[in-house]
Amino acid sequence: MPVFEEGKETTFARVEVHRYKQLPVCQAREIFFLKNRFLWVRDTVSFEKSFSCTAGPQWRARQIGPGVRANYAVSFFDIVPGNWWGKGRLAERANRFENPSWDLLVYFLPRPGCSLRIGDESGETIWRHAPQPIQYQWRGQGQPGCPLRFDSILYPHHPSPDPDSVVKQIQVVLDEGERVVLRVAFTVWRKAAFPNLQQTSETFWLALNPSGKPFKAGELETDAKRMSLRLEQGTPKHCFARAATHIRFGGKALHNSAEPRNVDQ
């Protein structure tokens, strides 16, 4: 894990695995965790030699909801099976815990040559908690110097009969393969006077810009290598950035420095 950055509202980590199962390939996973909100995960596959393969991120679910599309699916756990060793017969050693109603949108940024595959391994063993893999697959001839990049958004939300309305909360502002900018809307429920909950709408602007070159995407201008900006009612509330000399949003300067600096405020 060459990179692990802990911010007030954001955590970023990079994990690298070299020659997995002795294959001439390196996988790097970058994890952008917006605390108690959602995840952005980027997988980069680099080849040391040319060979034919199937590659792509895979997430696992217990159930798949309605409305599977070309690059996303809604998943959920209707129950959480558990088992432990104790007295009695095997049938008496299993239990099912109640699980609150909550869905997870598994969204993949569209990539050429990729397709969504959903499997079902429930018949293999009754103890598999998440028997349905959700994979965004690429098949072809991997080539050195031609890395594959996959971006996944794991977005929890209240159950909805219309998954398309949930997907509309995710907007791809800029997608240049390596440099990607996202705009994600999220609804937060906070405790208010009992028994009420207060609803707050937040908007996140997220960027991965490994080169550190300056760019402009929509209302955002920066040269940060990675950043997240949280807004409430259109007002910036918190910014997390790495190696930035300037950050401007909506024409307003949020950060300026002569040398690249980290921001968490």
Image (cartoon, rainbow, N blue to C red):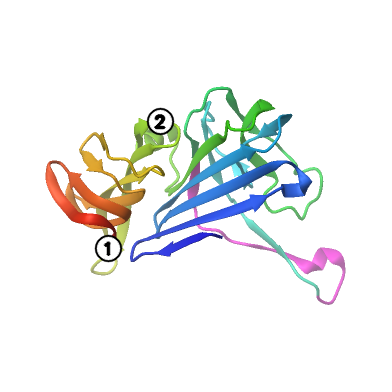
Q: In which quarter of the image is the N terminus?
A: bottom right
Residue 198 position, x and y percent, is 25, 59
Q: Give the range drawn in magenta.
A: 86-105
Residue 15 position, x and y percent, is 56, 55
Q: How crowded is mark 1: few (under 14 residues within 10 Å), some or many (20 or more)?
A: few
Which of these two is toward me, 265 or 40? 265
| Residue 6 visible in the snapshot | yes
Q: At 78% from the left edge and 47% from the top edge, which residue is drawn?
A: 22
The kind of residue on which mark 1 rests is Asn
> Total label count?
2
The residue wearing badge 2 is: 176
| Residue 162 visible in the snapshot | no
The residue wearing badge 1 is: 196
* Mark 2 vs 1, N-terminal side: 2
Left or right of 96: which side holds 11?
A: left
Q: At 28% from the left edge and 52% from the top edge, which residue is drawn?
A: 244
Q: Which structural element holds mark 1?
A: loop
Residue 147 position, x and y percent, is 57, 34
Residue furthest out toward the left: 252
Q: Quadrant of the C terminus?
A: bottom left
Image quadrant of residue 36?
bottom left
The kind of residue on which mark 2 rests is Glu
Relative height, residue 67 to residue 75 (above, below): above
Q: At 31% from the left edge and 48% from the top edge, which residue is drawn?
A: 224
Q: Which structural element holds mark 2?
A: loop
Residue 159 position, x and y percent, is 45, 45
Q: Within the magenta stretch, is there residue 101?
A: yes
